[in-house]
Amino acid sequence: MTNHKRFVVTGVALTALAAVAACSGGGGDTKTATQSGSAAEPVTINVHTFGGGENFGYDEAVKKWNAEHPNIQIKYQNLTDRFEDVYLPQLLQRLQAGAGAGDVVGIDEGAMGLMAARPQFFADLSQYGLDSRKADFPASKWEAGLNTDGKLFALGTDMGGMTMCYRKDLFEKAGLPTDREEVGKLWPDWNAFFETGKKFEAAKTGAKFMDGPNTIYNVILFQEAPKNGNLAYFDKSNQLIVEKNPAVKTSFDWVQKFSQAGLTAKLQAWSPAWDKAIKGGGFATMGCPSWMLGVIEGKAGESNKGNWDVAAVPGGSGNWGGSWLAVPKQSKHPKEAAEVLNYLTGKDGHVAAFKEAGAFPSSIPAQQDPEVSGLKNAYFNDAPTGQIFAASVANLQPVFFGEKHAQVKTAVEKVLEGMDQGAVKYDEAWTKFVEAGVKAAG
Amino acid sequence: MTLQLAPPRQGPPSQAPPPGRWGRFDLKGVPYLLVSPYYVLFAIFGVFPLAYTLWLSLHDWELAGDKTFTGLDNYVKLVTDASFWNAVINTLGMFALATVPQLVLALMLANALNKRLKGRLLLRLGVLLPLVTSVVAVAVIFSQLYSRDYGLFNWILSWFGVEPIVWQNEKWSSWLAISTMVDWRWTGYNAIILLAAMQTIPRDLYEAAALDGASARRQFWQITVPMLRPTLVFVVFISTIGGMTLFAEPVMFEGNPMMTGGTTGQYQTVAMFIVKEAFRDFDMGYAAAAAWLLFVLILVGTMINYGFTRRIRGAR
């Protein structure tokens, strides 16, 4: 960062010289006198995360830590709300460059396979005693944090217990029940959800029943994957199984059915139009892993408080999403970074993040904490989210992610969007879907 | 001419260059130092990336992963990659769709502004205004205008009973939308350059032509256009390079910038293809090869257009 400042202040000719000087300093390393890192001096630990709305929800946790640890100050930055296309490439570039990554970095589940295959970039957390935390996590969460060298490189933050978020005001308009218990009873399975959707459409509220293809697709995929060997797009030897895995086909078929029946608002998740519709009531339901609550709250804003509510998801439990924290090897203070990581992935960190962003803890002690199990979400009509999510993660199964999971996911979801919006014909969609997956994995 | 301009090398120090090392440096070194900033910057930001890209394109390298030398493999893969050619076709298509009307419009606009009009300065500044706005702002506004649900264009079409068009969904509609963004921004720019050139054409040529009974239309084709040839060549060059590297407009039009250019690559340009390969699929070597092919493509495109514009003569 110091080099960057120099760039700005000096004139054109000097800029060139400064750039040359910076380059000759051994691969752009930013060692300066102020960062000698001796234990007596206060150190700053940069924590970099991503995520929309309330993101990781670390504001309160960081405040608390900083007040108690004058010598290790956390500088917490949520770099972007977009993981796949902004955060991930940036992180990889910084890892490659050997500078610029945070001391503690957040990683989304979609990229865990990719990161596990790059052990050269991450510190071994067992060096700092964090292997003692094994009992705190469900096996799947723990195992995903081991890299291809078998070393512990990341610890879990949240996990995605699944629910269905819905617009209370729109349900009322459509003459459907609005109480979350009754709403949950409307759809014990996806067939019932489909029928409810048709009823909703028939009421002509001006809004659509669902947002678009991808949120529902992911919810169903992560319900189906455990029934099919806990696999999604890749098997455990990293071979693509998009075409062979019944979980993928079932999820695809459901989305096609919803789309053909005209139940979707044909919106791309994470697009500006989607944001607008979340805020303006363009659709009535959305598949909601726990972290999505924070996204909705952030995007819908104060004015929609009480309009959104949370009910049980059709088809039982499932896990979509969740993140991990890791310490890049390039960190100047790996020991202190590991301490911070330990805190944020510990019970206190998990509880604070759940309260702030609705990110449901993956750590078992935090899940059992009365503050979590008893928590109500004020934004969602005081929904007992602690209870709802605890129920939804009770029998959770791990899902395996291949190294190119993120690329394949993006490619096949594009086809789903195309099908929903009419660019891809329904009868050609599956072929195109498989083709896109094969290409992205190749 | 036996006038000796330079002082003898071995002679006693004359008064012109100060003695010592500094003197020699002052004479021989300083000029190089003074021109060096450009060349140093160009070496760092121009030559080095170019060479590095070439070197990279000969490797199979995943970002932050292993790098292996594979020779021309990436190029071989690329020329048989249907999605690369899809991107090339999109780029050329949007280039043609945007640039041809843009240059004709710019020429007409420049010709109009060259006449004696009231508030000429204001009008001339006016055509430059779109250029000042950020390309992102332009794309955001246009994307709203072209949006499916509340877009202005679909609203207007609805007066005539046309069903809302999902502009992103088809090649023709997305190309059209993106081309209008490009035109809105660059027509004025080209018009101003052409206008500047028009003003250097001597007035008496037109007067003489008028005396001979040439119509305004004939004057335009037989005097203005031929005299503008060097400027037209420049404008066409700039537009070609701009058109071939089209990036920001289609990316913003997509809304969700995964660089796929629509759900099936309807409007993915070569520049988007490169970014997608490099930063979505992390295949840096492949992206580098695509970047070099784009470079070649631009060279060829510019040559062809140069050939066209060279033919402009007063032949009508």
Image (tube, coloured by chain):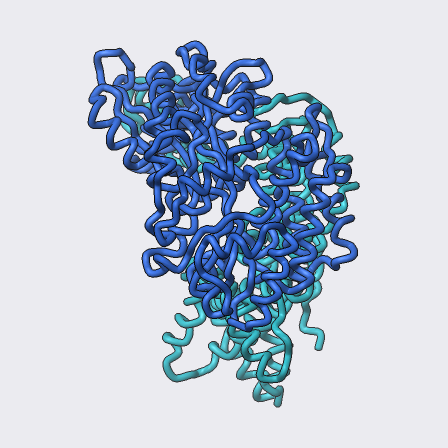
Chain colours: A blue, B cyan
| Quarter of the image where one finds residue B5 | top left
Pinpoint residue B109: horizontal percent, then vertical percent: 52, 75
Residue at image position (58%, 45%) is: A219
Q: Nearer the viewer, residue A363 or A394?
A: A394
> Where does the image place residue A40, in percent across and percent down from the top left?
21, 12
**Residue ID at (50%, 43%):** A289
> Looking at the image, which residue is at 55% across and 73% down?
A204
Hey, which quadrant is residue B163 in on the image? Answer: bottom right
Q: How many marks?
A: 0
Residue A337 is left or right of residue B139, and the answer is left
Quadrant where the N terminus of chain A is found in the figure: top left
Name the foreground residue: B90 vs B99.
B90
Residue B208 is drawn in which quadrant? bottom right
Q: Image point 50% across, 46% down: which residue?
A: A163
- Quadrant including the C terminus of chain A: top right
In this rendered view, identify the residue nearer to me: B34 or A42.
Answer: A42
Q: Position of residue B45 (x, y in %)?
A: 49, 35
Q: Taking the image as drawn, is residue A272 in sight?
A: yes
Q: Residue A423: percent from the left, percent from the top? A: 69, 60
Residue B36, above or below B187: above
